[in-house]
Amino acid sequence: MKPSVGRPREFDPKEFLNTALECFWVKGYRATSLSDLMKASGLASASIYKLYPDKRAIYLAALQHYMDEGASRRAQRHAEVSPEAALRETLEYVALLSSAPDGEKGCFTIAAASECLPGDEQVKSKVSSKFKNIINDLQKVLRKGQAQGVFRQDEDAGVMAQTIFMMLEGMRIYGKIQPAIDDLRKSNDFIVRAVLSNSDVNDEDVLTGHQHD
């Protein structure tokens, strides 16, 4: 009998998706090979093919995994705090992410859209769904704040949500050149002041000593 070569590495689907996500994020979909995924994960092709028929299936699963993780973080953040705090924490989270060393990788969803669109309807559907969900989540926060008198009511919550969303995604692209966190925070403060109700802005001006002409 041949000597035992040891037990094969156990397949953890979530761990593998995280590894695959990192590979695709750094190299892109087209430049990442199955060999790259095998080397990074330490898994044999047979183990990978038990769950995924090909590289494309792995990529789509990794993209969905990335989107689901983001949705879970947003839901938890928005549920635990007030509307204003939820908005501020969302802006701060993206600012920290964009100014950190890993910020130069940008957003994986944007990377997927940049590489695969136009032309890939499956990726387009996933990207579109994620973007709409972020906008909808922001809209819920803004509407809740409007109902409480925290956010301005003379502007449509949907328009404000879409504007903030575009700023957030732009921040992720800006992160590729490692912007200073203080600069991002100044922009975030401007966004918050722009959506606060007039009474809240005036109260803040009084407290900070700001005056208007």
Image (cartoon, rainbow, N blue to C red):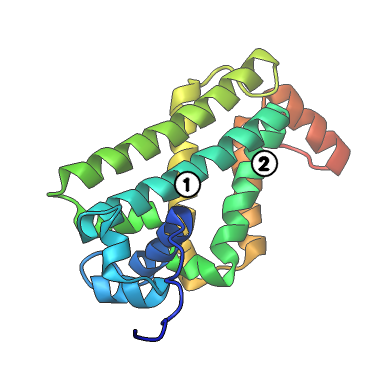
Picture quadrant of residue 6: bottom left
Mark 2 and mark 1 lie on one chain; the one further toward the N terminus is 2
Q: Is residue 12 among what the camera can see?
A: yes
Q: Residue at x 48, y 20 (%)?
A: 156
Looking at the figure, which quarter contains the C terminus?
top right
73 with respect to 60 (left or right): right
Furthest residue toward top: 147
Q: Residue at x 66, y 28 (%)?
A: 79
Residue 130 image label: none
Q: Position of residue 134 (x, y in %)?
A: 46, 36
Whether 144 is drawn above or below 12: the answer is above
Rounded to the nearest angstrom, the CA distance separating label 2 from label 1 is 13 Å
Mark 1, residue position:
167
Q: Return the residue nearer the eye: 129 or 66.
A: 66
Picture quadrant of residue 209: top right
Mark 2, residue position:
88
User: Is disc 2 placed on a helix, strand or loop?
Assistant: helix
